[in-house]
Amino acid sequence: MKKGRFLKFVIPIVLVVALCIPLMGCWGKAPAEEAPPEEEAPPEEEAPPEVLEPIKIGLVLPYSGLYGTSAYEAEHGIILAIEDLNAKGGILGREVEIEKFDVGNWAPADLIAARDHMMAEGVDGVELLFYGDSAMLEIFGAANTGGIPALGYHTSEPFAELIARDEFEDWNHLNFDDTTRLYAPHAYACYTKLIPEMYDYDYPSKTIAVLNSDLAYSIDIAERLMALVAEDPEWEVVYHGEFPFGTTDFSTQLAEIRALDPEPGLIKFIEVSSAGSAAFVMQFLTDPINSLVGIQIALAYSAYHEAVGEAGEGILGQSLPVANPTREFAAYEQRYFDRWGELSNDTGSAVYDRWTGWAEAVETVGDVKAYHEIIDEMVAMHYKGYTFGPDGWNLCPICQNDRTEVNPVIQDLVLPQPECHPGVAKGPTYGNNIQLYQARFTQVYGSYPVPLLIQGYPTEDYMLEHYGYLPATPALAEVGWEFEVPPYFK
């Protein structure tokens, strides 16, 4: 083949091969495909926070009964306590709620229904307010409730002794004041000794008319008061009458008292119903005589003051416990007034203390179901509240604290001293106070009790030592603290 012809055919073939070599590489291996970007896993959903069951406090209160005023005042105190507890995160991280039951006048059937309801609702503590007889002690005893703490006031010395004799079965009951054991000697000391000595008051006669209901509480106070007067050569009980609990017509008794000659220097009316007390005072004032009138605890009830108004000025009365003159209590009292439209009273502030103290004990123990440990912690703790001193509770001495029975002779309590009740109040300043009030009237608050005599009320030195400041200005400082002869005197 000629050279020219060879090249004519070879050169195009070479060019074709040369051009195809890169393409052959492409055919032999396909280019790697880029992996699609990995999809990000959706963020794990955070598990919703565990919702803990609320802790419930049961209110077994006599809303529709003769103690209805006290029931609502107790409820007000617990509501404020629960608001404060929940504002701090509850108890052990759990919200606190209340469960209510109207127990009327504490008939056994109603008490059993209340207990069964509270057990079904799973409450971890019950407020019983007042103890009347052994039925309540048994129905809410540890054997029937599993030991749920039952807090309240006992209302007679025999009832307190019943607790003392039965402490192992009823260890879950805590009682926070020693009412009748103290009321009778306080009345005797205040009326017959301290008013004449401190205020230079001369009674028209040193005679006393005693009128009480047939409730064990009232009978207990009346009997002990009359026993003290019987041993005093200067004083004499010239009249004693008894009426059914809840009575509101005292025309017969007042006619008999008005007929006494000379007029009694003191009329001591012993009843716990605010309606009954108001009725007695208003009926007395229709034709008053020159007698000091001292009623029992009703002077602390707003319902009593609403009923008597300005007419009740000058009436005397007793109440337990007294609130401490601290800035904290002054703020609480203002908050109470702003919320409920009435001034705080002993019941509301003491119940507030009971349940904030209980909450503190639960936090310390760490388990709201550890009932026995909580009770023991409450007995031992140094709780500082509105109605209790810096050193601890003022528990019933006959049945709590060291849990030993104490039976001082009643005369030893005429001017109570801390050693009369060993271990009752870790803070002696606040234990066993004498408290006597006189009703005054202000345009701001209307009728309200002003404290006249408080044995052991904190001194300025005590306040400076334990609180770092002087006593807070009392809400009613403008009306004074001095005893005044009642305006109804002729």
Image: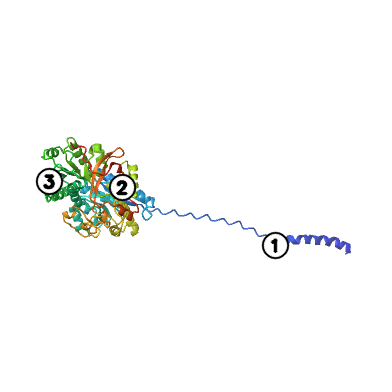
Residue 218 x, y percent position in the rendering: 17, 47
What amino acid type should be assigned to the residue bearing mark 1?
Gly
Scheme of colours in the image = rainbow
Mark 1 secondary-structure assignment: helix
Kindly state the secondary structure of the residue where label 2 is placed: helix
Mark 2–mark 3 distance (CA, rounded to whole Å): 39 Å
Residue wearing tag 2:
77
Q: Earlier in the sequence, mark 1 or mark 3?
A: 1
Query: Badge 2, how many Cα within 10 Å: few under 14, some, many 20+?
Result: many
The amino acid type, in three-letter code, at marker 3 is: Val
Q: Amino acid at mark 2?
A: Gly
Considering every residue shown, the one lying at the far top of the view is 286
Of the two numbered discs 2 and 3 in the rendering, the one whose residue sits closer to the viewer: 3
Q: Is residue 164 above or below residue 479?
A: below
Are there few (<14), some (14-19), or many (20+) residues within 10 Å of tag 3?
some
| Image coordinates for residue 377, horizontal then vertical, percent | 30, 59
> What residue did someone put label 3 on?
237
Dot 1 or dot 2, earlier in sequence: 1
Q: Cβ–Cβ below 8 Å for labels 1 and 2? A: no
Q: Nearer the viewer, residue 418 or 397?
A: 418
The image quarter containing residue 212 is top left
Q: State the SS at label 3.
A: strand
Q: Which residue is mark 1?
A: 28
Where does the image place residue 247, in percent across and percent down from the top left?
17, 41
